[in-house]
Amino acid sequence: MKIIMLGAPGAGKGTQAKKIAAKYDIPHISTGDIFRANIKNGTELGNKAKTYMDQGLLVPDELVVDLVVDRVKQDDCKKGYVLDGFPRTIPQAEALDKALAAIGEKMDYAIDVNVPDENIVHRMSGRRACVGCGATYHLEYAPTKTEGICDACGKELILRDDDKPETVKKRLGVYHEQTQPLIDYYTNAKILKTVDGTVDINDVFQTIVDILGE
């Protein structure tokens, strides 16, 4: 069972990816984790990626695909895996399909956690983070006992820059421009499944389980 998670920033795809990985006992693979592991272990691919990252440049698609394919060839991926945060663009998706075809594999599902932009802006701008211990809360969905104060350590809570409405809207703009075309790509490949991401987290997950099977 090879799954790609799609969805705008803040749609909750990462949360669902972790739940899928836990239920089906398959690895949850994010490109960030792959980069960190390869750089830490000093692999050839990791060193190549690091030369770009150290210069503040984006790692080229070919190298990202090489890192992902290297990861999915490992033994723990034999039963399948969940890709989270990759591919982000059509060229990445095409390169991934080509690389998987070369080892006799293909993706089974692309699951789009669909949430309207206004819901995401509301959801993310309500987040608050503790300046002390880093715990996160939400004004509406997970409030603290005392407004503006962390339950865990008593320090002040802040709205992080990347959760501010203007930043969220910018990130959504980039998402729609680059990643939204993947919806059409995977629709044409007949593997796209769309789930309503506006409902409760557990209800979203149940819909996904209904799609994947027990």
Image (cartoon, rainbow, N blue to C red):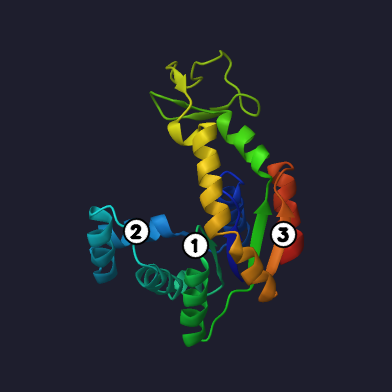
Q: Say the numbered circle drawn on residue 56.
A: none
Q: Secondary structure at mark 3?
A: strand
Q: Quadrant of residue 134?
A: top left
- Mark 1 to mark 3 CA distance (whole Å): 17 Å
**Contact check, label 1 and label 3, Cβ < 8 Å:** no
Q: Residues within 10 Å of mark 2 (few under 14, many from 20)?
A: few
**How crowded is the residue under tag 1: few (<14 C-alpha within 10 Å), some, or many (20+)?**
many
| Residue at 47% over, 29% down | 135
Find disc 2 in the rendering and name its residue.
58
Q: Which residue is mark 1?
A: 86
Q: Does the image show residue 130?
A: yes
Task: Tell me what residue is drawn at x 47 percent, y 76 percent.
Answer: 95
As measured in the structure, the alpha-carbon distance from the residue carrying label 2 to the one carrying label 1 is 14 Å
Q: Position of residue 3 (x, y in %)?
A: 60, 66
On the image, the x and y values in percent for residue 88 come to 50, 61
Count of numbered tags: 3
**The C terminus: image quadrant:** bottom right
Q: Nearer the viewer, residue 58 or 138?
A: 58
Q: Is residue 214 visible?
A: no
Which residue is nearer to you in this view: 161 or 4?
A: 161
Element type at mark 2: loop
Position of 207 with respect to 46 (left or right) is: right
Earlier residue among tags 2 and 3: 2
**What is the three-letter code of the residue carrying label 2?**
Leu
Question: N-terminal of the two: label 1 or label 3?
Answer: 1
Residue type, mark 1 in image: Phe
